[in-house]
């Protein structure tokens, strides 16, 4: 394969980012793996989707890249745990699901914990390093959110 200018730099940067992302995921996961988080990762992902607003079960399944039947069972478990509410639609077959107050409280606790963990790590970095990191992550987010045609696409992580 012929090396093009900048390709090796991008590959080295990708390797470094991959390693750094692993460390970031470890910090992120510490907040989620505590005794007061009563749900596994897949259910947590569903709650983050619902935090953006109510959706029907079919849309939730699409967001989770899951079968509608699997998403429905996942909603059953979240509803039994008091973390989501179902609202019947005009048509009996279409049910909308949304976060309950308990579900929102769980996500708020997780967000606070994640930010505390991140602040702990960031406080050990110099101000210029923190500024460079935040600038780079902002640029990365913009690049990852843009589609190849430049029109952008919806891509966001839970806040």
Image (cartoon, grey):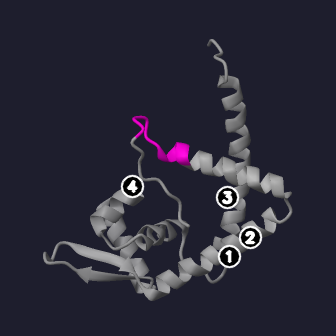
As measured in the structure, the alpha-carbon distance from the residue carrying label 4 to the one carrying label 1 is: 27 Å
Q: Are marks 2 and 1 in contact (CB under 8 Å)?
A: yes
The quarter holding residue 131 reads bottom right
Few, some or many residues within 10 Å of mark 1 (<14, 14–19, 20+): some
As measured in the structure, the alpha-carbon distance from the residue carrying label 2 to the one carrying label 3 is: 11 Å
Secondary element at tag 1 = helix
Residue, disc 1: 113
Boundaries of the magenta span: 142-150
For marks 2 and 3 on the same chain, the one whose residue lies earlier in the sequence: 3
* Whole-percent x, y for residue 24 in the image: 70, 57
Residue, disc 3: 25
Residue, disc 2: 117
Secondary element at tag 3 = helix
Residue, disc 4: 65
Is residue 60 within the magenta segment? Answer: no
Q: Are marks 1 and 3 in contact (CB under 8 Å)?
A: no
Name the residue located 68 percent from the left edge and 71 percent from the top edge: 115
Q: Could one spot residue 159 in this view of the protein? A: yes
Asked whether, in this view, residue 48 is left or right of residue 96, the answer is right
As measured in the structure, the alpha-carbon distance from the residue carrying label 3 to the one carrying label 4 is: 21 Å
As measured in the structure, the alpha-carbon distance from the residue carrying label 2 to the one carrying label 1 is: 6 Å
Secondary element at tag 2 = helix
For marks 3 and 4 on the same chain, the one whose residue lies earlier in the sequence: 3
């Amino acid at each position: 394969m012929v090396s093009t200018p900048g390709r090796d730099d991008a590959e080295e940067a990708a390797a470094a980012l991959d390693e750094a992302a692993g460390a970031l995921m470890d910090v992120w996961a510490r907040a989620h793996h505590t005794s007061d988080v009563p749900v596994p990762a897949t259910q947590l992902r569903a709650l983050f989707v619902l935090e953006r607003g109510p959706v029907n079960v079919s849309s939730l399944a699409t967001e989770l890249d899951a079968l509608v039947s699997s998403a429905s069972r996942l909603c059953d478990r979240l509803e039994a745990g008091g973390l989501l509410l179902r609202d019947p639609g005009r048509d009996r077959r279409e049910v909308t699901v949304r976060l309950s107050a308990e579900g929102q409280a769980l996500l708020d606790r997780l967000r606070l914990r994640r930010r505390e963990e991140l602040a702990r790590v960031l406080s050990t970095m110099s101000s210029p390093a923190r500024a460079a990191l935040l600038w780079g992550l902002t640029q990365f987010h913009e690049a990852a959110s843009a589609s190849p045609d430049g029109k952008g696409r919806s891509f966001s992580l839970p806040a």
